Image (tube, rainbow, N blue to C red):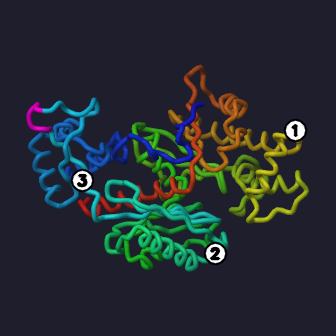
Amino acid sequence: MYDAGSDAGKGPASGSAVTGCGPLMPSQADRGNSLRQQVFVHVRAMGQVSRADIARGLGISAGSVTAITADLIQAGVLLEIADQPREGPREAGRGRPPVALAVAPQGRIVVGIKVADTRHSAVLADFAGNILSDLTLPVRQPRKPAAALVTELGVLVDRLLAQAGRDRGDLIGVGLGISGIVEHETGLVAWSPLIAGRDVALGQLLAARLDVAVQIDNDANVLTLAELWFGAGRDRTDFAVVTVEHGVGMGLVLDNRLFRGSRGMGMELGHTKVALDGALCRCGQRGCLEAYLADYALAREAATALDRVPAASDHDTMIEALYAEARAGNAAAATIFRRAGRYLALGLANVVQLFDPALIILAGERMRYDYLYSDAMLREMQALTLSEGRTTCAVATQVWGDLVWARGATALALTCATQAVLGP
């Protein structure tokens, strides 16, 4: 196991020297985009890059790069800057300084949103992926009708824009992550613990409220996009992200692209079954992994161990108290956490067995508890996996706040906005 970074609490690329955003290793599917879009995406990923490096990176002619970049500069999406080589500034008097290209960040902006049961968080980013502002608003009622949720999100976006001093006319896209089963292509939320009712056209409703294109995805997917665009997954072709907090989610990257399944509703690790006729899950079924591992499951167990009546708004307090009891030697409390760790080991072993990723990143609020990344949990995961002497899957931990989930949602908006601005 290794830690994904010393700045884990800040999120990917926070305070980092790494420039650019987006995958550094284009997938085969990206070759279907126009050369114009491929050039722009390559420049945005690199942060700044010379025309010669663009030609080498994309395997196209220097003449094509010259023509395309001239067009993109004219369109106001790229600009020329003085090239600063990685080994340091150039010596004075050594000829004309080399010129690099970068994304012109001015004007176009996008918003990424993380919807949660106690608070909604949003970040404002420019077309280069740089965060300009962020805002978090508390939520009184965790589960609500879609109309009420749309009203809350509309207020959140309006306040974020006002805080940054930006006009709604500059907004060219919104990305949103929400827990549950989400059809990304249609913006339909088939089910979410945060929305009363099923088959809600949340994308369409929010787009009508904001008068801008809205892209929606499962929240674990947007956190995976945060890794793919801004974090440890930028230079990896395949990895998985498993989230443990209010629920248990998973995102999967294959061939350097987010994998969603045939209907955009895949990777629901929390709702894979680990026990027939087992514990009741908030989805209404029994035996789901998250019914043994998520916040509400641990709070339910804590209520018994601590002889308290659980409250929906008091999960954090209950779990903190239970964890303190376990650390103090309470055998019942320690057993609850050990069992949760064993169920996580089972879930991770299934992920390894099905997809064989090179890396699994464990993320979410609960990663501050060592039972989720203990040596015992990792040993059990490995024992449940048919490794046959091969190198075991690497496991990293990342403790992030809601703003990183929201930043991952900006990748949804930037992808859609890039298509709109540059053409398919």
Badge 3, how many Cα within 10 Å: few under 14, some, many 20+? Answer: many
Eye-nearest disc, 1 or 2: 1
Residue at the image position 28 percent from the left and 65 percent from the top: 107
Where residue 132 sits in the image (x, y, percent)?
Answer: 40, 59
Mark nearer the N terminus (1 vs 3): 3
Q: Is residue 115 above or below residue 4?
A: below
Q: Is residue 270 visible?
A: no
Q: Amino acid at mark 3?
A: Gln
Contact between labelled residues 2 and 3, with CB atoms less than 8 Å apart: no
Q: Is residue 164 above or below residue 233?
A: below
Mark nearer the N terminus (1 vs 2): 2
Q: Is residue 80 above or below residue 5?
A: below
Indicate the secondary structure of the residue bearing disc 3: helix
Residue 168 in magenta stretch = no
Badge 1, how many Cα within 10 Å: few under 14, some, many 20+? Answer: few
* Residue corresponding to mark 3: 37
Mark 1 to mark 2 CA distance (whole Å): 40 Å
Mark nearer the N terminus (3 vs 2): 3
Q: Amino acid at mark 2?
A: Lys
Which mark, by number, is residue 207? none
Which mark, by number, is residue 329? 1
Q: Residue furthest front?
A: 92
Q: Is residue 79 visible?
A: yes
Mark 3 to mark 2 CA distance (whole Å): 40 Å
- Residue stretch in magenta: 93-97
Where residue 35 sits in the image (x, y, percent)?
Answer: 20, 50
Q: Is residue 253 left or right of residue 98?
A: right
* Residue corresponding to mark 2: 144
Residue at the image position 52 percent from the left and 56 percent from the top: 403
Name the one closer to the observer, 29 or 335. 335
Majority SS type along the magenta span = loop
